[in-house]
Image (cartoon, rainbow, N blue to C red):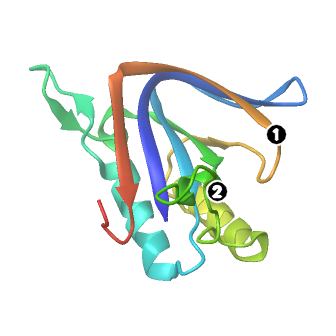
């Protein structure tokens, strides 16, 4: 799984001119599922995202997690995170999981976040979404469950 974690002051997602997810202070997560992902990849992301220490403590150091600050989470499915643009000019998306595999993993991630007590909103898998955010910092972190970067 791949993720782009953005610390935000606020974020929202819209489908067909309707806001379907909206958060205040927290994390906007763009999440992509790879065709070779397994349960261990899901577990990695479920542990890493809410515990990533990217929020400032009382000394101004990034030393607190989403859980520590009581932040909210907005999760957006994004298969293009698995795009490979190393060759040619058109990215290849062959590494992205097909919807039959990606949807359950995406939904399971959201369920696990909600079950852990994190206020979690989400986009609509496969929809044309418009995402708005105010990146706080800016702070943007790339995650990969296989730790390729």
> In the rendered view, does 46 fall on the left or right side of 94?
left
In this rendering, the answer to whether 69 lies above or below 10 is below
Residue plotted at (35% across, 22% down) = 138
- Callouts 2 and 1 close, C-beta under 8 Å: no
Residue plotted at (64% across, 56% down) = 79
Can you give x and y, in whole percent of width and height, for residue 32 in the image?
A: 57, 58
Can you give x and y, in whole percent of width and height, for residue 21 in the image?
A: 71, 33
In primary-sequence order, the first of circles 2 and 1 is 2
Instruction: Identify the mark at residue 79; answer none if there is no mark.
Output: 2
| Quadrant containing the C terminus in the rendered view | bottom left
Can you give x and y, in whole percent of width and height, for residue 75 in the image?
A: 59, 45
User: Which residue is denoted by mark 1 in the rendering?
Assistant: 128
The tally of labels here is: 2
Marks 2 and 1, how far apart at CA:
12 Å
> In the rendered view, does 5 fall on the left or right side of 141?
right
In this rendering, the answer to whether 12 lies above or below 2 is above
Residue plotted at (34% across, 57% down) = 48
Q: Residue furthest front?
A: 88
- Determine whether the residue tagged by mark 1 lies in a helix, strand or loop: loop
Crowdedness of circle 2 by 10 Å Cα count: few (<14), some, many (20+)?
many
> In the rendered view, does 20 fall on the left or right side of 68?
right
Crowdedness of circle 1 by 10 Å Cα count: few (<14), some, many (20+)?
few
Query: Which of the 4 quarters of the picture holds residue 44?
Result: bottom left
Query: Which of the 4 quarters of the picture holds residue 14?
Result: top right
Q: Residue furthest left?
A: 59
In this rendering, the answer to whether 47 lies above or below 81 is below
Residue plotted at (63% across, 70% down) = 105
- Determine whether the residue tagged by mark 2 lies in a helix, strand or loop: helix
């Amino acid at each position: 799984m791949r993720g782009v974690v953005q610390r935000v002051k606020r974020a929202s997602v819209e489908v067909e001119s309707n806001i379907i997810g909206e958060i205040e202070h927290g994390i906007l997560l763009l999440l992509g599922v790879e065709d070779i992902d397994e349960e261990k990849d899901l577990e990695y992301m479920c542990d890493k995202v809410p515990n990533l220490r990217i929020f400032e403590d009382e000394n101004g150091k990034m030393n607190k997690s989403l859980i520590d600050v009581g932040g909210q989470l907005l999760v957006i499915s994004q298969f293009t995170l698995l795009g490979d643009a190393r060759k040619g000019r058109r990215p290849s998306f062959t590494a992205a999981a097909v919807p039959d595999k990606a949807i359950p993993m995406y939904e399971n991630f959201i369920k696990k976040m909600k079950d852990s007590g994190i206020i979690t909103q989400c986009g609509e898998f496969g929809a044309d979404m418009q995402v708005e955010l105010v990146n706080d910092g800016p702070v943007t972190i790339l995650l990969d469950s296989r730790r390729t970067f």
